[in-house]
Image: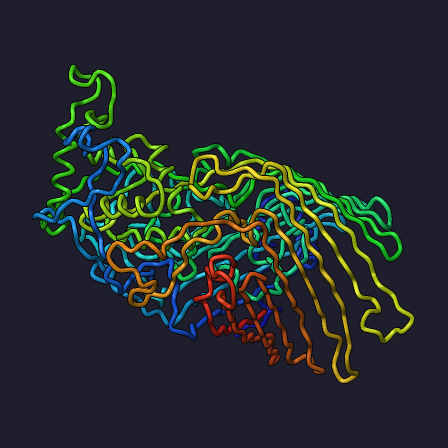
Amino acid sequence: MRSAHAIRRAMVAGMITMAGSSAAWGDEGEVGGFFSDLFARTTFVGTVRSDTAVRTTGLQNFYDQGNMPYQHTAVPRQAYLPPSLGSALLGTQVLPAATNWNIPIPNIGLHTNDTVRRDTYIKSDDVKVNYQELRFSGEMNMAFTDNLRFNVQARAVFDPDISNQFDARSLINTQGGIPGGGADRYADTGRPNYFEARGRNGRNLNPTEFAGRKYMVDFPTALLEYKHDAFNLRLGIQQIAWGQAIFFQTFDVPNGLDFRRHLVLDRAIEEFSDKRVPALALRGAWQATDEMLIDSYISKFQPSIIPNPNTPFNVAPAQFYKPLDNYFTGGYNNKLNFGIRMKSDYGNWGYSAMAASRYNPLGVFSWSESGINRGLHGTNADGSTWGNSLGTLVQTAYAAKAPVGGTLCPVYNPTTCRMYDSLGEALSHTPLTIAPAGVYSNKEWFTSAGLIRLDAVKMLNTVIQEYPALRDVYASEVSGIEEASNLLNTFFAASDGSIRGTIQRDYYRESVFGLGGSYVMETEDPGSFWNQFIINAEAQYTPNRRLTGTDLGHGGEKTNEYILTLVGEKWFRYTESFPAAYLAFEFQHRSATDLVGLNLNGYGGLMRSQPVEDPIGLQGNDYSHLKVAKGISSADYLAFAGFQPWPNRKYVFEWAVLWDVRGGVLAQPLVKWNPGHNVSVDFFYNYLNGHLYGNEGNNLIRVIDWADEFNIRIGYQF
């Protein structure tokens, strides 16, 4: 095997040979000298790594097909007479307008009363390995002069797809299969897509990323850096880190986060270094005095990236299509973020301030027109047909309405008029699509809404209010849980299976302001724990921040949010036999969102995630256990993290604990082993419990507490 020095000599020789063939560079000696000197000032570092996470409980991701709530439960569905249809058939004197979704349709050969089990259509998953990833990362640093350098980092990731999860093509002969259309549906109509992230029009959200279903190659950094005296300029693709807290972000606002690979369950102490979404930016820093630093940037807006449906760490119910991203179609790809930060020290005190104008990278999710034309009957790929008698009745009644604008219907009335030629065309102008592997019952609807912090009744009313085509097909607003359940089960029963939803993501500009301070404690006793203990406090205030509404309405909700963070740090040597340990104690208070930016108004809804028989005891039309989001006034988190090296530094013990004070905890103990020869091995465990006490719908951890897992990371640096 050739040595690294031999490879370098060969590369230098090749570069000199190619350069020497061009007379424009002068004679061979000058060219050779130039490139030899340049290569001598160039460093290369590479790492290959394998990450594996094996689940240690019977729970699996309940956002993905095959593991969803009610997967193994026979759920009753009863169809009810739509008020608008009832008014047309019986007249308003027999059926007063105030009556709403409370007259059951007798089961007289109309398929109006049934039970449904998801596992009748979708096989259950039994994935043992939550996460398996092979990765190469490399960095080249080329110093042209003492003042100018070029730095590039490359990352290649491959997922061998050993989890073998849900394949949408398996349902091609069920309810017509999962259709595409209306936009790029790259993540919905085939096998799980681990890495691609595209906009509604099919373009990659990250322009420096090259991804396929099982692989991704990207460049976290590719920049020129110029330093002169007290000035530093960086131009190119880069990540800008303005925060140091573990788990928490207060000042760290320049970049969005990439949640695709291992969500937030990687080595916690890495402080988002693998999660920040890189962006093209110009960053300038000025060391104004020995005590004062001014740092500013202007960058191209890049959004946060969420996992795709049916991937191991997906966090959105796969009964809905992957959100259609309006990054390109909304013109957000041409928007700029900019900000400035100041840090100053005065003795034991430190001060900081920042201001930024940015597009919130998480964005606002709302209902979206699907563009998929499919009615209540159809033909499968194998030639068989699907549909039931209730669906036939609804389509017949729709076809019997007069077209709007004709002599029988000069003015639109949804009771007697129709806007479209067919019910399928009408549905194409709504967010709802008749298709398998969607929502099958009212119970699923309320549970999924609770899991993603939405109000199940409000989001139903909003989709009816914002999309008139739904009123065209006999939907009408509801009042309360019972009416919502009756409407939902009527539509699900008529679909002869389930209905899928379509949502979209838009982005809104916000101004973010921050103030911070720090203090280094000193005591008379140098050995005291409190000597050199560092206290950091940061506060963020954002007026008129746009959040996803609990009703999925367009434009979301506006709120003024403040975030307060307090961090205590200490290097502490408790015995001469061991090196000093690093300790970090953290607290954060948030007034409007949780740690990942979700709206606190959506907390408190029904959250039953265990795929067991009848998990909440509902039988027939008993709605007593269903509930909608009530919201919480604020969120508070505590964290304790640190690491302790062994005397020979062959081992390092790390830990990170995040406690949601409303009843959830994430604990990550880790042992790093350095056996030598540039090899490192990390063993760590993720323990999550979101039902320690209190209402399980009121803490952040509950939505991911299925992910108890043992992790092993093996890396080699060359």
Residue closer to the observer: 206 or 348? 348
Picture quadrant where residue 513 is located: top right
* In this picture, residue 178 sits left or right of residue 261: left
Q: Is residue 451 above or below residue 486?
A: below
Residue drawn 23% across and 26% down?
419
Residue drawn 65% across and 80% down?
650
Tell me the quadrant of the picture where the C terminus can be found: bottom right
Residue 232 in the image: x percent, y percent?
Answer: 75, 45
The image's colour scheme reads rainbow
Picture quadrant where residue 447 is located: bottom left
Q: Is residue 394 above or below residue 411?
A: below
Residue drawn 67% across and 72% down?
643
Residue closer to the observer: 480 or 145? 480
Residue drawn 87% across and 65% down?
522
* In this picture, residue 18 sits left or right of residue 216: right
Q: Is residue 469 above or below residue 280?
A: above
Q: Residue at the left extreme?
A: 109
Residue closer to the observer: 235 or 433? 433
**Can you see residue 553?**
yes
**Can you see residue 9?**
no
Residue 56 in the image: x percent, y percent?
Answer: 43, 75
* In this picture, residue 257 sits left or right of residue 36: left
